[in-house]
Image (cartoon, helix red, strand yellow):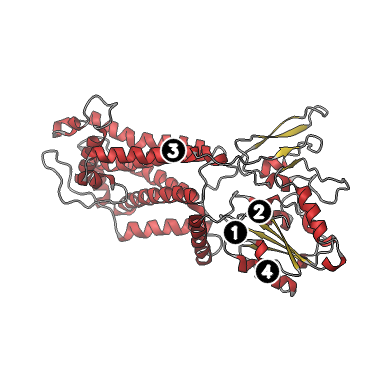
Amino acid sequence: MMALPALRATPRVAWMRLERILARVFASGANPLAQLGAVACLLLLLLLISGVYLYVVFEPSATGGWRSIDTLSRQQPFPGGWLRSMHRYAADGFLLIAVLHLLREWVLGRSTGFRRASWLTGVPLLVFVYISAIGGFWLNWDKLGQYSAVASAELLDHVPLLAASLTRNFVNADAVSDRLFSLLVFIHLGVPLLMLFGLWFHLQRIHRPTMVPVRSLSLGVIATLMLLAAWLPVSSQAPADMAVAPTALAFDWILLHLHPLADATSPGVVLVLVIFVLLILLALPLRIRASQPVAVVDPGNCNGCRRCVDDCPYVAITLQPHPNAKPGMQLAVVAANRCAGCGICAGSCPSATPFRSLQRLAPGIDLPQHPLDTLRRQLHEALSQASDKGKIVVFGCARGARVAAVESHDVVSFSLPCTGQLPPAFVEFALRCGASRVVISACSNGTCEFRLGSRWTAERLAGSRDPHLRRHVPKSRYRLVFADVGDEPSVAMAVRAIRDDRVVGVRP
């Protein structure tokens, strides 16, 4: 049967198992590991909102910075001091989530090919997060801010491009002028603006990016920060004094971990380490991988309906005037460097119906390595004999549960690059060819390798997205199950249930 090689990368499988466990713990699609990017965007929004309030009462001067923030915390514990604590904990969470998001994408192998641009624009964002977070401690200008500013200056003094020493700006109290403090304010406020600009680039090739997690997860994140801010409020330490070196400090190990590392080794060693890590991260997308065949447009069958444009997860398809048709008619064009080879565009094409009388099924857009014509032919052959009638047909995703594992004397399976490649009409076609039931296995919410494949599949089968499954197809004769890598028992359970005509509730 039509099958693709299973993915056997151990780190990826282990990560997917962890996500599957959390998917059972967090109901209603609120698995945080599957929405790390959205959680990071939510935390950034909270940082901006709380930061605006703090800046209103902040006095941007060397002598007034500490006083204004300390007075806010003491005289206005709510909402002033509470928002200040929220700001700090949101910054901690933002850095942790950003690093975890980068780790997840690397473990799942999402740094090369059509994802290269997103990776290369995401790594600098991590640098901006560090700079902005560390710069926030300087503005408070207490003992911790003093320690961080001096340690950062010592680190930057080892950069060969900087001719003048930055440490000289902190040799005594007179050196820390309001002019220098204005520079520190600019760093903390200007870098987030660069971060927002970089985030726009980061999401340029993502269609319908999820900027905010599902409501239950969003409320959970906000409630956690609110409780932390109320239970462990952040307070200023003693004001900075350049004549006295800070000793005992209430330290933030999440945001300032580079400073003690520099104390234990040297600023030069830490700088080399940071540069080395950045070079490794930037070099990851340069790994040589086998070229991925991209979707191919058939001008004779494409009428420019733009469904493939709307469904493509990576903005890889655009429209241009059709060269062989009347004025106003358009033709889909695929950008090879953006195409994921997922086939979701083929599943959205209205000409991809298997009921066409043509000897060869030629949709307006299709995958040359896994054409729908081959799927139609193999499906017809598997159900052509009288002895094959009544079989259960299982369509699955090569990146999810292995549907071949459920094959038996009355079950036949077909694996696709993504379940989103399956036009809904193939479900009706299988039933007309003699299949007794049809099971469609898609990846669960947030774990789809190509982001939108399982979502579009569910909406097409439900009739809320075109092309949709025609309503006269009995719902009792097909089931949609959400199963990830290693979740073959869920597919087997759906097969047994539909064989026995039992209704099984599946959770996306």
In the figure, 55 relative to 248: above or below?
A: above
Q: What's under tag 2, amino acid-wise? A: Leu
The residue positioned 77% from the left and 29% from the top of the image is 322
Mark 2 to mark 4 CA distance (whole Å):
22 Å
What numbered label is drawn on residue 282?
3
Q: Is residue 383 visible?
A: yes
Q: Earlier in the sequence, mark 1 or mark 2?
A: 2
**Distance (Cα) linking label 4 and label 1:** 15 Å
Q: Residue at x 62, y 50 (%)?
A: 452
Residue at far top of view: 163
Give how far apart the Cα atoms at labels 1 and 2 are. 19 Å
Q: Position of residue 165 (x, y in %)?
A: 21, 28
Camera-nearest residue between 417 and 439: 417
Instruction: Name the residue carrying label 2.
Output: 4
Q: Secondary structure at mark 1?
A: loop
Residue found farthest to the left: 243
Density class for disc 1 (Cα within 10 Å; few <14, some 14-19, many ≥20) is many
Q: Which residue is drawn at the image coordinates 62% and 67% (left, top)? A: 490
- Distance from Cα at disc 3 to Cα at disc 2: 30 Å
Q: Earlier in the sequence, mark 4 or mark 1?
A: 1
Q: Which residue is mark 4?
A: 494
Q: Which residue is mark 1?
A: 444
Q: CA distance from mark 4 to mark 3?
A: 43 Å
Mark 2 crowdedness (10 Å alpha carbons): few <14, some 14-19, many ≥20? some
Q: Indicate which label's residue lies in the foreground, 4 or 3.
A: 3
Direction from residue 2 to residue 315 in the image, left or right: left
In terms of secondary structure, where does tag 3 sit? helix
| Nearer-N-terminus badge (4/3) | 3
- x and y, in percent, of residue 176 in the image: 19, 32
Q: Amino acid at mark 4?
A: Ala
- Bin the neighbour count of mark 3 within 10 Å (Cα to Cα): few under 14, some 14-19, many 20 and up: some
